[in-house]
Image (tube, helix red, strand yellow):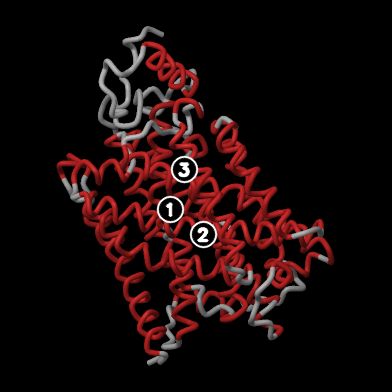
Amino acid sequence: MSEESVNLPDTGLSAEAETHEERIADQEDVANARVEEPDIRVKKPFWKSLGPGLITGAADNDPAGIGTYSVVGAQFGYKLLWPTLLCLPLMIAVQEMCGRVALLTGKGLAAVVKEHYPKWLLLGCVFLLMVTNIINIYADLNIMASSAQMLFHGVFLLWLSIIALFMMLTQIFMPYAHYARFLKWLCLTFIAYAITALMPSVHNSWSLIFKNLVLPTWQWKTDYLMALVGSLGTTISPYLFFWQAGQQVEELIAQHEADAPGKRKRSPNEAEMHNLRADTAAGMLVSQLVTFFIIICTAATLHAKGVTNINTAQDAARALAPLGGKIAYWLFALGILGAGLLAVPTLAGSAAYALSETLSWRHGLYRRFQRARAFYLTIAGMVLVGYLLNFFRKVSPIKALFYASVLNGVVAVPLLVVLLFICNNSKVMKARTNRPLSNLLGGLAVLLLGVASLFMLWALVTGHSA
């Protein structure tokens, strides 16, 4: 590959400051990331279009999601099934917007905000993202260590340390292309909930399930409002906005459509848009099917038996008890560990994308550590801070996951508004601005999350429920 064949990213350095060796190293990273036969501009069969959207959907069912849906099913039975169906088109629309921004511009969301909007808005978005992601990482590491302890015994802090160190090392030293292939299959760990829910010995009321799935209910109670915001927040999560955009940029580089972040070679065609939508829809459908089965499984096995308050990994694992004895604990723990291996890098990576774009650092999981130290150290630093929080504040593992989801729900509102502004800005999106349906679904997501969050905060502050 010749030195001139790759456009270099904007690293904030002058041409003189960039050495010949550095330019060659950047070119090598790009070459190593690329596939042999790019076909991104060809309309693909459905299964071949799966990529960032599927991984994003699988990451949506992180330990915080499993914990939140377990709390919802145990506490309210089938009553909060309706957001599962309602959120499907909303999350498809939201994540399609995120992917479309990256597909068109070749940039992540923070880079787009930096270029077109005031600095205070950029810093506000990145701050909110990093705070919520750290809390999520803290909660995810907490339940992962608790699950490992449940299976293998030993000391909680030892398992916490092993898992956190493993996360940091794999993200820094394992090529992400290899890791991503593994991530696509982690969603299979959630099949245990579907099997349990469909077992003859688990007496689900399917007529009641259908009723609660299609007919929304509302309760003016603080715990119900918190459960609703948590359910919405772990479904339409801020970190997924930045993650999918970042992953879409990396796929453009791998498919020879960009030479670096922000260096898109040509405008996307209709085949690329079709592949993006198919990928996103598949990922979100997988996410919501898992959500549905976790809720009905915990409703039938825990709520129906009067178990409405779960706090530990052991409590949540009992939802899979019909599968038999220790099998339930193994499946739950392995599912949590698998989901955490998927989600924690996503949480840390989305923050690293946003911060790197804000500060004009070299970034990208296709790069070697030596070429993007600040990016990778941000990933490691996010995991480290989440790890350290476990020493300062001990909350029951399941409740920590639930509270993290509630925080996601509140923070998602302003970030969704920013996303809608971007996708309706013709200077950014050219002819690919939002269609009326995207604006309708995006607006409904803002309205639903905003109203639920406001009522929840009012109830928490005043101590009253209407």
Q: Residue furthest right?
A: 325
Q: CA distance from mark 3 to mark 2?
A: 16 Å
Q: CA distance from mark 2 to mark 1?
A: 10 Å
Q: Which residue is mark 3?
A: 378
Q: Secondary structure at mark 3?
A: helix
Q: Residue at x 83, y 66 (%)?
A: 324
Q: Which residue is mark 2?
A: 136
Q: Earlier in the sequence, mark 2 or mark 1?
A: 2
**On the rendered structure, is 389 left or right of 107?**
right
Q: Residue furthest top?
A: 2
Q: Earlier in the sequence, mark 3 or mark 2?
A: 2
Q: Secondary structure at mark 2?
A: helix
Q: Which residue is mark 1?
A: 239
Q: Residue at x 35, y 55 (%)?
A: 127
Q: Would you place residue 312 above or below residue 60 in this image?
A: below
Callout 3, which amino acid? Thr
Label 2 Cα neighbours within 10 Å, binned few <14 / some 14-19 / many ≥20: many
Q: Position of residue 364 (x, y in %)?
A: 43, 33
Q: Could you tell me which quadrant the C terminus lies in?
A: bottom left
Callout 2, which amino acid? Asn
Label 1 Cα neighbours within 10 Å, binned few <14 / some 14-19 / many ≥20: many
Rendering quarter of residue 250: top left
Q: Would you place residue 399 above or below residue 273 in this image?
A: below
Image depth: mark 3 or mark 2 in front: 3
Pointer 2 with pointer 1, Cβ within 8 A = yes
Q: Residue furthest left?
A: 427
Q: Position of residue 222 (x, y in %)?
A: 45, 85
Callout 1, which amino acid? Tyr
